[in-house]
């Protein structure tokens, strides 16, 4: 497999799939340039070698051309951080993109328009509803709709081939550096790699770091391996839990998932979020963990509120004794100490998901305490990987970022990797 360290980009045009899906304010100013900064080592290496760079990204979730989600809004920010006046093409497969890419000189950079302005990037039909929600139950009644959608999907897949080939034709080499989209088999993240031989496609520096961090946790972990999983629903993390039970020594279940497990064990959870249809599944997870010798760690107390509000009245009670009109919004102080004790013994740590309703400032303390415990364990020699929007926000906002071994830029991609799935954007480069 080709590596960016060993490749000389002199005289080459590099198509770099970056993740510039950055937040913008009402005046279209970039409010957080973290993702732009993350791509700089790769982009600067190409330019320093004497190559030129063609950057491609998505922004938002457009369903067609939308001026508000145009990448032209970030040209200034990218130029400033890259130290080069970045050119812009108002399409990504049209005549302007082709002409500007062809005219690029060594040391120059071009940013293409939002890839997702085109249905072919994702390979999904637009303007027609996916009938899957009723196709299984009433296939005869909706036969026409099902047939129409199938035809539309086939048409998009066919045009996607031309779209992908056009993107590939712009450059001599392909560099995948957008881990946040690696779980998508899109034209620019996976399919395009087929148009380049093994010597002309590679991961960028950011992707290399992400892949190495995931491998270190899932394939090269040192015991004790502690995973902390938050999030509101067991259903969204069930595959993750099942995969981790074969890898971890300790699994801390936190966030809203706490209350489904608590109720499954016979506790009272008041108005706390609960998936009643997964109570049996929760009990099965507990039995599986026990059979595999995994220490499943649950909260022992909860910070509760009498309404879902930052300004609600609060109290701390045993997690299985929440009054009927109250709900759990964070862990309590005894649980903070319990989690910290488990984390302190770890040599490998994975954290995905906060302990409570992190968007409310009065219910952030549990997540902060977890971040602090991870930072201390990391200082003591553990390898720590933090991923997921709120977990990352916590370590960044409260000054723990420099105390974590690696902070992932991928939300859904990291989650699918933890589930044990092979990510298309990774397989496209290394073959597995």
Image (cartoon, grey):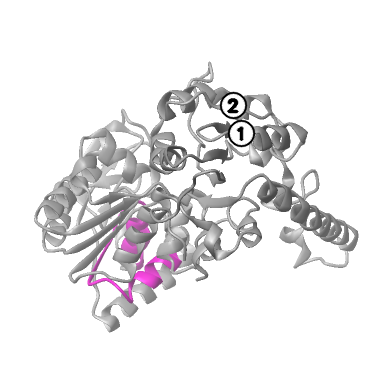
Residue 120 in view (yes/no):
yes
**Left or right: 282, with 432 as reference point:** left
**Left or right: 318, with 46 as reference point:** left
Callout 2: 10 Å neighbours few (<14), some, many (20+)?
Answer: some
Residue depicted at 66% across the width and 59% down the height = 195
Q: Which SS class for mark 2?
A: strand
Q: Which SS class for mark 1?
A: loop
In percent of width and height, residue 95 lies at 77, 34
**Left or right: 38, with 363 as reference point:** right
**Left or right: 48, with 59 as reference point:** left
Residue depicted at 21% across the width and 58% down the height = 383
Q: Which residue is mark 2?
A: 87
> Is residue 402 positioned above or below 335 on the image?
above
Callout 1: 10 Å neighbours few (<14), some, many (20+)?
Answer: some
| Magenta region | 238-264
Quick check: is 181 in the magenta stretch? Answer: no
- N-terminal-most mark, 1 or 2: 2
Name of the residue lying farthest toward the top: 27
Residue depicted at 9% across the width and 56% down the height = 380
Residues 94 and 182: in front is 94
Name of the residue lying farthest toward the left: 380
In percent of width and height, residue 89 lies at 66, 30
């Amino acid at each position: 497999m080709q590596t960016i360290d060993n490749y000389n980009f002199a005289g080459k045009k590099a198509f770099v799939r970056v993740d510039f899906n950055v937040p913008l304010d009402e005046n279209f100013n970039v409010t957080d340039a973290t993702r732009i900064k993350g791509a700089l080592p790769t982009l600067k290496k190409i330019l320093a070698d004497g190559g030129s760079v063609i950057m491609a990204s998505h922004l938002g979730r457009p369903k067609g051309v939308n001026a508000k989600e145009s990448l032209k809004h970030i040209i200034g920010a990218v130029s400033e951080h890259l130290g080069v006046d970045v050119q812009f093409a108002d399409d990504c497969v049209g005549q302007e993109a082709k002409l500007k890419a062809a005219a690029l000189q060594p040391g120059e950079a071009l940013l293409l328009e939002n890839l997702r302005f085109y249905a072919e990037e994702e390979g999904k039909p637009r303007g027609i509803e996916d009938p899957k929600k009723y196709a299984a139950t009433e296939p005869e009644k909706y036969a026409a709709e099902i047939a129409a959608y199938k035809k539309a999907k086939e048409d998009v897949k066919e045009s996607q081939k031309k779209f992908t080939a056009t993107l590939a034709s712009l450059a001599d080499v392909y560099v995948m550096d957008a881990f946040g989209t690696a779980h998508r088999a899109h034209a620019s993240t996976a399919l395009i790699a087929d148009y380049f031989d093994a010597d002309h496609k590679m991961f960028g520096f950011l992707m290399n770091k992400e892949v190495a961090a995931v491998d270190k946790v899932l394939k090269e972990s040192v015991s004790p391996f502690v995973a902390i999983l938050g999030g509101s629903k067991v259903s969204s993390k069930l595959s993750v839990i099942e995969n981790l039970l074969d890898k971890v020594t300790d699994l801390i279940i936190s966030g809203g998932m706490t209350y489904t497990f608590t109720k499954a064990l016979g506790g009272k959870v008041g108005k706390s979020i609960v998936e009643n249809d997964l109570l049996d599944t929760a009990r099965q997870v507990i039995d599986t963990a026990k059979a595999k010798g995994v220490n499943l760690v649950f909260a022992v107390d909860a910070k509760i509120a009498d309404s879902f509000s930052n300004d609600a009245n609060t109290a701390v009670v045993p997690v299985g004794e929440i009054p009927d009109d109250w709900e759990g919004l964070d862990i309590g102080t005894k649980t903070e100490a319990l989690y910290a004790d488990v984390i302190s013994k770890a040599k490998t740590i994975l954290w995905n998901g906060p302990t409570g309703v992190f968007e409310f400032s009065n219910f952030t303390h549990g997540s902060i305490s977890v971040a602090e415990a991870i930072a201390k364990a990391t200082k003591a020699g553990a390898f720590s990987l933090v991923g997921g929007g709120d977990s990352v926000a916590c370590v960044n906002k409260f000054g723990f970022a420099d105390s974590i071994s690696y902070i992932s830029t991928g939300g859904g991609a990291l989650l699918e990797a933890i589930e044990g799935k092979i990510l298309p954007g990774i397989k496209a480069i290394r073959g597995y």
